[in-house]
Amino acid sequence: MVNWQNYYTHKGHTYGECATRSDHNYYYINIPKNSSSWAGTLLAHWCVWTRTNYHTHDLSHKTALILLRDPVDRWISGIGEYVSLYHKQFDVKLCNGQMIDWIFDRVAFDDHTERQSMFINGIDQDRAVFFWCDQNLSANFTKFLYESDLINDTFVMPQRENVGDQITLRSQVQDYFQTLIQQRPKLEQKLKSYYAQDYDLIAHLKFFS
């Protein structure tokens, strides 16, 4: 029997991955492409957080910290990440109609492109704090950490960086698909259909601000 939690373990991510501190009642759930590198660095700068998995260790007494992102925006970033990691010889100039149909039929290829709702499956949403990944994320996430005594005035905030823009192949792939879905609304609708569960989740949440 296949354990669904290990579906993307071969790609480096196991569902339920998170980090926590023994002296605080919070745990941070890692969702790839949702400013996870920045958030992880921010928390690690302050103190040591222990890596764990909420599916295998009972963290139900703690509050989850979760960063979510617009699904289509995340997919564009994620498909660039996927290609740059696993298909370094990929050339957008050779991306024909058949390949495009295949990509948008599949949609999810790894943990960077899978539904966000899969990463928080089974959590108690009433015992979670959600943050929206936009231009206000740094301010909102930092505000919460200060108010929760997870960081203090001696903390030096790391800057958010878009690492994808620093790698040519990622940028090329992201720009290509960004333009493609703008030109072909039916392709964007295929993405939205695949991520319908994410959009429904997002629509019913209240985000910290």
Image (cartoon, rainbow, N blue to C red):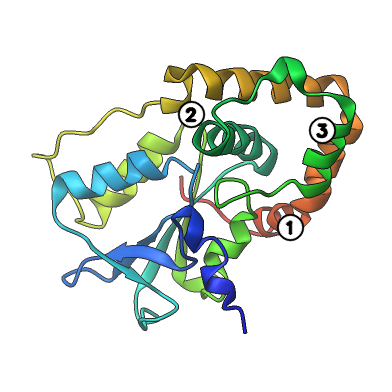
Would you identify the image quadrant in which residue 186 lies?
Answer: top right
Residue 64 visible: yes
Q: Earlier in the sequence, mark 2 or mark 1?
A: 2
The x and y percentages for residue 207 are: 53, 51
Mark 2 and mark 1: Cα distance apart in space: 22 Å
Would you identify the image quadrant in which residue 191 lies?
Answer: top right
Question: Is residue 178 depicted above or below 16 in this figure?
Answer: above
Q: Label 2 belongs to which residue?
A: 135
In the image: residue 44, left or right of residue 39: left
The x and y percentages for residue 9 are: 48, 62
Label 1 crowd (10 A; few <14 / some 14-19 / many >=20): few
Label 3 crowd (10 A; few <14 / some 14-19 / many >=20): few
Mark 3 and mark 2: Cα distance apart in space: 34 Å
Residue at the spot 74% in from the left edge and 51% down from the top edge:
195
Q: Earlier in the sequence, mark 3 or mark 2?
A: 3
Q: Label 3 belongs to which residue?
A: 99
Q: Which element type, helix, strand or loop, lies under badge 2?
A: loop
Q: Which element type, helix, strand or loop, lies under badge 3?
A: helix
Q: Label 1 belongs to which residue?
A: 200
